[in-house]
Amino acid sequence: MRIETEQTVAQQSNNVSTSSTHSQLKQGLLFVLSAPSGAGKDTVINTLKEQGMDFHVVSSITTRAPRPGESEGNPYHFVDVETFERMVANNELLEHALVHDNWYGQPMQQIRENLPLGRDVLLKIDVQGGATVRQKVPGAIFIFLVPGSIEELTSRLINRDTETDSERQLRLKNAQYELAQQDYYDYVVENRQGHLAEAVEKVRSIIIAEHCRLHPRYVSL
């Protein structure tokens, strides 16, 4: 009878452990991806999604005007300064910063809706935003994407032709500062010209590896 009791206790303990593990596995991870403008963040993200990786990319709020081909919610929610300030006052944004003369922010609602459902969330933000999230959510996983060189970055900005000359010069100037912040990130991935597949595979491997941690870096907001 004693043996049966011990077996029953052991089985119940295993069931509790398994149930706890399954509960944890339902939690998604929060990733932060930063890079200088033109380093290829969107291309890497879109390629990962085309390969079947399921994660939610938070649609940032911005006060800048839509570019040709952009629309509401794709890839940003476009608002006026008054609306943006109201969202800040109501604590609706995880972080916000003035970048390239325009305001950008990350709405918390999208994060809160996806993480508990077991879906990873990715914040595509600049280094200012990354620093703020690091203070507020130290359990997030931080990835920095760098170009092969400043020359490559300059070429990409020129070829995509989405900024004026003055806007492009501002972005290149800011890139020098942004690249100096990479030491604060958990991972640095180089996206060299003509080697996109290599960069994508490295980011993919990081996501997979973080889920294989004995104690994954779950966060709550």
Image (cartoon, rainbow, N blue to C red):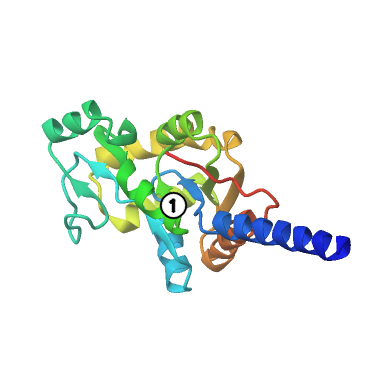
Residue in the foreground of this view, choosing between 46 and 38: 46
**Residue at the disc numbered 1:** 115
Using a 10 Å C-alpha cutoff, classify the residue at mark 1 as few (fewer than 14 neighbours), some (14 to 19) or many (20 or more).
many
Q: Which amino acid does label 1 sit on?
A: Leu
> Residue 144: percent from the left, percent from the top?
53, 45
Q: Among all residues in the image, which is located at the extreme front?
A: 1
- From the viewer's perspective, is residue 111 above or below residue 180? below
- Which residue occupies 33% across, 52% down? 158
- Which residue occupies 58% across, 34% down? 184
Residue in the foreground of this view, choosing between 44 and 148: 44
> Can residue 51 be spotted in the picture?
yes
- From the viewer's perspective, is residue 118 above or below residue 78? below
Q: The N terminus lies in which quarter of the figure?
A: bottom right
- Which residue occupies 38% across, 55% down? 57
Q: Among all residues in the image, which is located at the extreme bottom?
A: 51
> Residue 200: percent from the left, percent from the top?
54, 63
Q: Among all residues in the image, which is located at the extreme top?
A: 89
Q: In this view, does 170 lie to the left or right of 152?
A: left
User: Count of labels shown?
Assistant: 1
Residue in the foreground of this view, choosing between 12 and 103: 12
- Which residue occupies 87% across, 60% down? 2
